[in-house]
Amino acid sequence: MKLKSFIYVGLIGLASQTVLAQSNILNAKIPEEIGMKTEAELLLDNDKPLEYGYVGDRDILFSKMTWEKVVLDERVNFPLYFPVEDNIGDDRKSLYRVIKENLDSGMISKVYADSYFTEERTLKDLEASLSMTRITDAGIDYMNENGVGEDELPEEYVIKRDIGPADINSYLIKGLWYFDKRQGELKYRIIGIAPAAPDVNFIDDENSENSEPIPMFWIFFPEVRDILHEAKAFNNKNSASPISFDHLLNSRRFHGVIYKEENVYGDREVKEYIAENALMQLLESERIKDKIRDFEQDMWSY
């Protein structure tokens, strides 16, 4: 028992040193050195996302594709939403900011219009859903009176609105539940993720019918695992040990409500066959979850 305790303490101490070395906050002489690694640390750094094991098609005894809505108002989902400000630092970013910055820089090269990844989108295609520019009524009067075009219009007559981290109120996640008969357990694999926000043209209209969040674009999750592994989410229990977004999502440290499952009716959503009844829609989501869980449970019932 003493040897086992000594090993645990040693591993914890080593992990703590590794975390502190990565942040460099105790060794920095100037603020710019915080987060920098030495050359020796960079050579020894082999921090990569945990690779998915190969799963053959014959090993899948059962599978069910589901779509979940992860509402960011729920406390358990706060690590995906906060922080929404820019002044905290490069090591503290929301999931949307990580995605958007890598999308702008070209690190995320492919996004799609739907969750089936059939139609690819470019940054130019996304401009209409991510930003809005509108001329006020006074601006239109100014253009008519002075005979000027939009390029010569003063900024005071132009309203510009961009979708920011604070506007993202949910994420849509597409994932596959499957039973691996070789390992004898039910597993889950994320296939795609999409940030959702109200229509940018009506986002500030509280009573608008278009305030329902819509997915802005879909990302094929396996393509961005390295990026999400480098970005860290805040760990409220221990700030010295942040969690990568890749780990957070793959370990299902979030709460989602199933709004669609693959079905014979063209993968129709729950709200299409249970209309205008939020309680029954929620119960239907739980029924789908129970149906998937019961399959694994029934495997061990003789």
Image: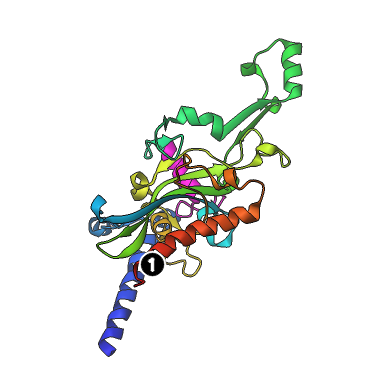
* Quadrant of residue 247 within the rendered picture: bottom left
**Vertical order, 190 against 115 (above or below):** below
Horizontally, is 74 left or right of 125 in the view? right
Horizontally, is 118 left or right of 79 in the view? left
Name the residue rendered at 32%, 57% in the picture: 37
From this viewpoint, is residue 48 visible?
no
Horizontally, is 10 left or right of 31 in the view? left
> Where is residue 39 shown, x and y percent of the image?
26, 55
Look at label 1 and name its amino acid. Asp
* Quadrant of residue 7 within the rendered picture: bottom left
Residue highlighted by disc 1: 298
Name the residue rendered at 47%, 64% in the picture: 235
Please provide the residue range marked out in magenta.
83-104
Horizontally, is 98 left or right of 284 in the view? left
Q: Residue furthest top?
A: 147
Query: Where, quadrant-wise, is the C terminus in this rendering?
Result: bottom left
Query: Where, quadrant-wise, is the N terminus in this rendering?
Result: bottom left
**Vertical order, 237 against 156 (above or below):** below
> Where is residue 225 shown, x and y percent of the image?
35, 49
> Where is residue 168 shown, x and y percent of the image?
57, 46
- Residue 267: within the magenta? no
From this viewpoint, is residue 197 visible?
yes
